[in-house]
Amino acid sequence: MPRLWNETVEAHRRDVRDAILDATAVLVTQQGLRSATMAQIAERTGIGRATLYKYFPDIEAILVAWHARHVTGHLQRLAAARDAADDPGARLQAVLSAFAYVVHEMAQQRHGTELTVLVHRDEHVARAQLQVQNLIRDVLADAANANATRTDVIPDELATYCIHALTGAGSQPTTEGVDRLVMLTLAGLRADIGNSRS
């Protein structure tokens, strides 16, 4: 009996936390970062302010948690793209394409530069960025081992190249532009370019 009770309480807390994060994201999108208040968030979530403060001390903490949830979702998306492809070359293309589309979609959302600056200070985000770097590095290493990509540059450096190149997907107005950017990035990784110089 206590285990069932604990699971129910934990599920309820997760639901309330998610509702708080969702309500905050909507308010920030509608009103701007500095206009949303804890009272509005509590009202939109359907909870009292005292309950809201049990979960988060202030709006900044809510926004950091909201962003952390988004980042976790992005990492899961990249991992799913990696796991769905059969061979190292296809895995590389799938992961780079997924990353470019994550960047593109984030740029299309109207959360503003202020929010980006605020949440990118968090340690969780730095850890997530390292996870993205490592995931892309590992996919590149597998592709290099299969002679599907260049081997004259170490995978860590190639991962940095890919991340910086594909960050440009955020300024692409169309999905066709995102696809071209992915193809251009992949062209810079071709085995026949780098390996012929080794």
Image (spheres, rainbow, N blue to C red):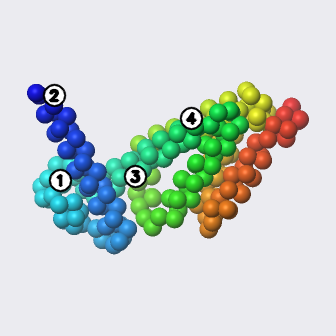
Marks 3 and 1 close (CB-CB < 8 Å): no
Name the residue located 78 percent from the left edge and 30 percent from the top edge: 147
Question: How far apart are the alpha carbons under marks 4 and 3?
Answer: 24 Å
Seen from the viewer's position, the closer of residues 107 and 175 is 175
Q: Of circles 2 and 1, which is in front?
A: 2
Say what amino acid the circle numbered 1 marks: Tyr
Q: Which residue is mark 1?
A: 53
Q: Of circles 4 and 3, which is in front?
A: 4
Considering only vertical position in the picture, is 183 above or below 195?
below
Q: Residues within 10 Å of mark 2 (few under 14, many from 20)?
A: few
Q: Which x, y percent locates residue 21?
A: 30, 55
Q: Which mark is residue 3?
A: 2
Q: Which residue is mark 3?
A: 67
Q: Residues within 10 Å of mark 3 (few under 14, many from 20)?
A: many
Farthest-out residue, right: 196
- Point out the tag, 4 or 2, that comes first from the N-terminus: 2
Q: Of circles 3 and 2, which is in front?
A: 2
* Relative to 10, 197 lies left or right: right
Say what amino acid the circle numbered 4 marks: Asp
Name the residue located 52 percent from the left edge and 39 percent from the top edge: 80
Marks 4 and 2 close (CB-CB < 8 Å): no
Considering only vertical position in the picture, is 172 above or below 167?
below
Question: How far apart are the alpha carbons under marks 3 and 2?
Answer: 31 Å
Question: How far apart are the alpha carbons under marks 3 and 1?
Answer: 19 Å
Name the residue located 48 percent from the left edge and 47 percent from the top edge: 74
- Point out the tag, 4 or 3, that comes first from the N-terminus: 3
Q: Which residue is mark 4?
A: 83
